């Protein structure tokens, strides 16, 4: 059983999503003998934004820029890690109403025609359906249905849509929100999220 753990927060040790994603991985480590964990920190080792050189490299061209040359190799490694994983755990903080750009750069490497989806006669078809994906979301405010900011929620809705597009049906989301409202609400939200992490079903 292979688990891929992804973090994207820029807040290091103060990160809420890192704490919750770490608790998820600890729970699955404890309950799954022999589990192999690969870790990718997208803030510490960011992937570049996609460029024309990346697209040309996918068609067989050799990038002129050494930075893109290295990044094309990193890109392939990121895709291979994702394809190999049975379980993917993602720490996903909300920055400006959506995912961090570091996480978007990773998604740009794993949503790949012919690898994780394809277009058929009936339209797009996801190819990553055998994976279990667990996402730990952290948000400063409240975005639940009926709240004034609900229309600004483009983090959870986006991630649900992306993973559905590539065929993932086993998707679990743990939310810690209202984290910037005050210390009491932060403690309550983190307690709830960490409890949810330890209550996850075993692998
Ligand atoms: C650059 C930046 C942008 C943010 N934008 C939002 C936002 O749009 N909505 C929100 O509710 N919280 C926002 N926050 C607050 C974070 O979502 C909150 O601090 C959360 O804990 C971040 O997760 P992390 O601690 O794992 O980094 C932002 C924080 C940062 C650093």
Image (tube, rainbow, N blue to C red):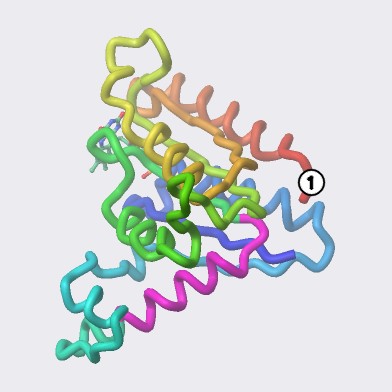
Q: Please name whichever residue, 53 or 182, is drawn nearer the observer in this view of the structure.
A: 53
User: What percent of the width, then of the height, locates residue 179?
Assistant: 39, 28
In the image, the segment drawn in magenta is: 71-87
Is residue 74 located in the magenta-colored stretch of the structure?
A: yes
User: What percent of the width, then of the height, locates residue 124?
Assistant: 44, 49
Ligand 1 positioned in quadrant = top left
Toward which corner of the image does residue 30 lie, by quadrant? bottom right
In the image as oriented, which residue stretches furthest toward the right?
A: 33
The crowd level at tag 1 (other Cα within 10 Å; few <14, some 14-19, many 20+) is: few
Q: Please name whichever residue, 196 or 19, is drawn nearer the observer in this view of the structure.
A: 196
Locate residue 170 relative to residue 14 in the image: left or right.
right
Q: Please name whichever residue, 113 or 162, is drawn nearer the observer in this view of the structure.
A: 113
* Residue position for label 1: 202
Residue at image coords 81%, 68%? 34
In the image as oriented, which residue stretches furthest toward the top?
A: 146
Residue at image coords 52%, 46%? 19
Q: Please name whichever residue, 54 or 104, is drawn nearer the observer in this view of the structure.
A: 54
Most common SS among magenta residues: helix
Residue at image coords 62%, 64%? 85
């Amino acid at each position: 059983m292979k688990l891929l753990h992804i973090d994207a927060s820029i807040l290091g040790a103060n990160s809420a999503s890192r704490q919750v994603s770490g608790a998820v991985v600890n729970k699955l480590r404890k309950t799954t003998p022999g589990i192999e964990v690969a870790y990718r920190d997208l803030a510490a080792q960011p992937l570049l934004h996609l460029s024309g050189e990346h697209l040309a490299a996918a068609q067989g061209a050799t990038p002129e820029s050494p930075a893109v040359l290295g990044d094309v190799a990193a890109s392939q490694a990121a895709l291979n890690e994702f394809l190999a994983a049975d379980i993917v755990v993602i720490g996903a903080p909300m920055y400006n109403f959506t995912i961090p750009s570091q996480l978007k750069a990773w998604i740009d490497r794993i949503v790949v025609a012919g690898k994780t989806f394809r277009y058929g006669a009936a339209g797009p078809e996801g190819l990553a359906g055998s994976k279990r994906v667990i996402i730990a979301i952290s948000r400063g405010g409240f975005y639940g249905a009926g709240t004034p900011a609900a229309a600004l929620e483009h983090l959870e809705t986006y991630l649900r849509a992306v993973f559905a597009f590539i065929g993932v049906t086993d998707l679990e989301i743990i939310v810690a929100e209202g984290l910037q409202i005050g210390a009491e609400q932060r403690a309550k939200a983190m307690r709830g999220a960490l409890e949810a992490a330890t209550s996850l079903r075993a692998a």
